[in-house]
Amino acid sequence: MARDSIQEWLKRTNPKSRKEQFHEKEPTVTKIEKVLYTANTHTTGGRDGASHASDGRLDIKLSTPGSPGAGTNPEQLFAAGWSACFLSAIKIVAGKMKVALPAYPAIDAEVDLGTAHGVFGLAARLKVSLPGMEHEAAEALVDAAHEVCPYSRATRGNINVSITVVTNAVTSQPIHQTEEIHQ
C-alpha cells in the first residue's frame, strides 16, 4: 500500500494529526464488551518478592531496580509486555492496510521509574525499527498501531511517552505524549 493510502486510512480511522493524538487525553474509559483473555497472577513480597501465574507459564522472582537481587522488576515486565503488544498491533494494522512489513521488525522499549510532585511515576520510550520501509509509510503505520494497542491506549494521557520510528537511513523526530502526574 502506498504512503498516501496509509495516510488516507489513518485519516479515516482517526482524523487528528499525529501530534494531536499524542497530546490528547481520552475523556472516557473504554469498557470491554467481550473478554478475550484474563491473566491471573499471585504476587508476594512486592518489588522484592515473586510472582506466579495461575496457568504455570510465569514463575518469576522480583527485585527492586538497582538492587543486587536476581529477579526482574515491574518496569522490565511492562517494557516487555508493551513492546510485544505494540509489535502485534503493527502486524494487525499492516494486515488490515495490506502493507508488507520487513522481515525483522523490532521494538526497543525503555520504561523509567521516577518521581514527580512527591509521587512515583513512569515514562516510556519506544524505538520502532522497520528496516527497509518507506519512512513516512512506517510512521503512519506506527501511528495507527498506537491507536489500537491496548497498552498505548491505557497509558495515553497518563505517562510521558516518546515513540521513534527507525527505517534504513531515517530516524523520525520522536513524538511525545506528555502529561504531568497529578496527585
Image (cartoon, rainbow, N blue to C red):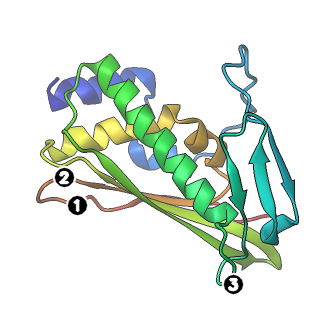
Q: Secondary structure at mark 1?
A: loop
Against 1, residue 74 (above or below) is: below
Q: Secondary structure at mark 2?
A: loop
Residue furthest top as drawn: 34
Mark 1 nearby-residue class (10 Å; few <14, some 14–19, many ≥20): some
Q: What quarter of the picture does the C terminus occupy?
A: bottom right
- Percent coordinates x, y for residue 67 in the rendering: 69, 84
Residue at (41, 40) in percent of width and height:
87
* Residue that label 1 marks: 171
Residue 183 visible in the current orientation: no
* Residue that label 3 marks: 67
Amino acid type shown at disc 2: Thr
- Percent coordinates x, y for residue 83 in the rendering: 47, 49
* Residue that label 2 marks: 167
Tag 2 and tag 1, C-beta contact below 8 Å: yes
The quarter holding residue 142 reads: top left
